[in-house]
């Protein structure tokens, strides 16, 4: 067997098995009793519901993972990628047209593969537990918007990377520089051109909350370019808040469900947490980490996309670079996982720091704790995740760990 093919098949199976083990450990880590810290917001029925939600979503996720693993293995071993390349080559002899056709076919196949799972997750599981607010119309529109957006963003990136590797010395470095510029443009335009495709951004209306936000921002010497509410309730009853953009497009977005379910003091604490990310330079650090990861990826990729054995592993006699880039990601999996773990460690550290900033800048952590408790209940979050699950996958610390850290903040 082709050594690349053997390595890729082993990686795919190992990745699935490892994920299965982690999820089994996570399910077995249930705590029979409501943690004392959350006894004031969780009754026995609500706690049982959160455990049922975790159990059902985990089992569904593993069934989905097993099916997807079988599909991708079959697609590779039966020459699926070679078939897609042949279709692209049948349309045009030009590499750039072939790239567009190849990308479009893979995106359509990926969408079709994930569609039944998305439907079941949204309209069965999320509906069963009272979260789903998505209408069939919104669901279908989201699919088309994601496809269109994926093409508009991914195709130029794909074509640009290929051009550099076909025409320029040190292509990995030049391609990286171009991607940095492109990503910064995306970050800048996302709040005004991309995110509004999916949610309506409305400037926070005048009232007590806006006055309190302005007072808080002035006290922190923080220029608020815009605080917006978004209609998250049209898809889910779950709440969230996030920071997006930079410069003139910098925005803090508060879900309408967050505003409805939380007091002004709690919302100020949540806002303070987001401001903390800015004040502590977390946004910049995450962007730099992303750029460094991309640089490493391109550097390693430059050694593999010229290897004919990689293409032969997928049933190809030719070496079209657009296919080689996709094939490379299969062997990049272990390093991608390591980088993901490191990125999550950094993110969890940043969450603790932003929580501490919120506590210090609002005169105490109690309002943030109240907000975290409500968010936990409203999303039926897992209160006792397995440490391995947290280490590998969690970008935010578990709620109990955050509450404990907040109680230890020195004001």
Image: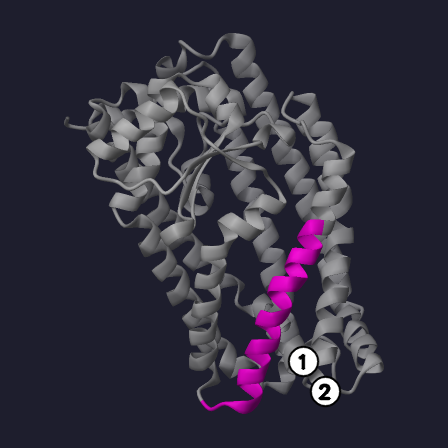
Between residue 130 and residue 259, name the one nearer to us.
Answer: 259
Between residue 390 and residue 10, name the one nearer to us.
Answer: 390
Residue 222 x, y percent position in the rendering: 26, 40
Q: Quadrant of residue 363?
A: top left
Q: Secondary structure at mark 1?
A: helix
Q: Quadrant of residue 273?
A: top left
Which residue in the structure is indicated by mark 1?
Answer: 311
On screen, 231 above or below 365? Answer: below
Work out whether residue 376 can be spotted. no
Give the left or right position of residue 208, taking residue 320 as reference.
Answer: left
Residue visible at 65% across and 57% down in the picture: 149
The crowding category of the residue bearing disc 2, from other C-alpha atoms within 10 Å (few below 14, some 14 to 19, many at least 20), is few
> Which callout, 1 or 2, points at the residue further toward the start of the chain?
1
> What is the magenta range?
145-169
Image mark for residue 318: 2
Q: CA distance from mark 1 to mark 2?
A: 7 Å
The quadrant of the rendering that contains the C terminus is top left
Residue visible at 45% across and 56% down in the picture: 188
């Amino acid at each position: 067997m082709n050594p690349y093919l053997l390595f890729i098949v082993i990686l795919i199976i190992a990745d699935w098995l490892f994920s299965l083990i982690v999820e089994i450990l996570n399910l077995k880590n249930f705590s029979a009793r409501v943690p004392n810290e959350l006894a004031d917001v969780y009754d026995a029925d609500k706690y049982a519901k959160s455990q049922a939600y975790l159990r059902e979503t985990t089992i569904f996720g593993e069934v989905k993972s097993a099916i997807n693993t079988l599909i991708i293995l079959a697609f590779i071993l039966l020459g699926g990628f070679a078939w897609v390349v042949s279709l692209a080559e049948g349309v045009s002899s030009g590499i750039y047209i072939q790239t567009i056709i190849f990308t479009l076919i893979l995106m359509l196949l990926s969408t079709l593969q994930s569609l039944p799972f998305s439907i079941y997750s949204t309209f069965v599981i999320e509906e069963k537990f009272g979260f789903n607010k998505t209408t069939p119309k919104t669901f279908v529109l989201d699919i088309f918007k994601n496809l269109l957006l994926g093409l508009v963003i991914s195709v130029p990136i794909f074509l640009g990377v290929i051009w550099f590797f076909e025409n320029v010395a040190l292509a990995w470095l030049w391609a990286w520089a171009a991607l940095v510029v492109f990503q910064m443009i995306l970050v800048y335009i996302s709040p005004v051109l991309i995110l509004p495709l999916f949610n309506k951004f409305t400037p926070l209306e005048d009232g007590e909350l806006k006055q309190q936000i302005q007072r808080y921002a002035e006290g922190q010497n923080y220029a608020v370019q815009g605080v917006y509410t978004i209609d998250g309730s049209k898809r889910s009853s779950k709440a969230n808040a996030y920071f997006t953009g930079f410069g003139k497009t910098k925005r803090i977005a508060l879900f309408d469900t967050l505003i409805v379910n939380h007091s002004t003091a709690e919302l100020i604490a949540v806002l303070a947490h987001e401001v903390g990310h800015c004040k502590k330079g977390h946004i910049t650090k995450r962007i730099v980490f992303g750029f460094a990861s991309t640089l490493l990826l391109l550097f390693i990729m430059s050694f593999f996309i010229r290897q004919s054995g990689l293409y032969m592993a997928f049933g190809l006699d030719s070496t079209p670079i657009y296919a080689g880039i996709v094939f490379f990601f299969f062997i990049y999996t272990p390093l991608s996982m390591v980088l993901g773990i490191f990125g999550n460690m950094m993110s969890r550290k940043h969450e603790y720091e932003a929580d501490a900033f919120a506590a210090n800048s609002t005169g105490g952590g109690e309002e943030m704790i109240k907000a975290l408790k409500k968010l936990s209940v409203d999303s039926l979050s897992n209160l006792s995740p397995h440490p391995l699950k947290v280490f590998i996958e969690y970008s935010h610390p578990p709620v109990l760990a955050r509450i404990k850290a907040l109680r230890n903040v020195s004001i």
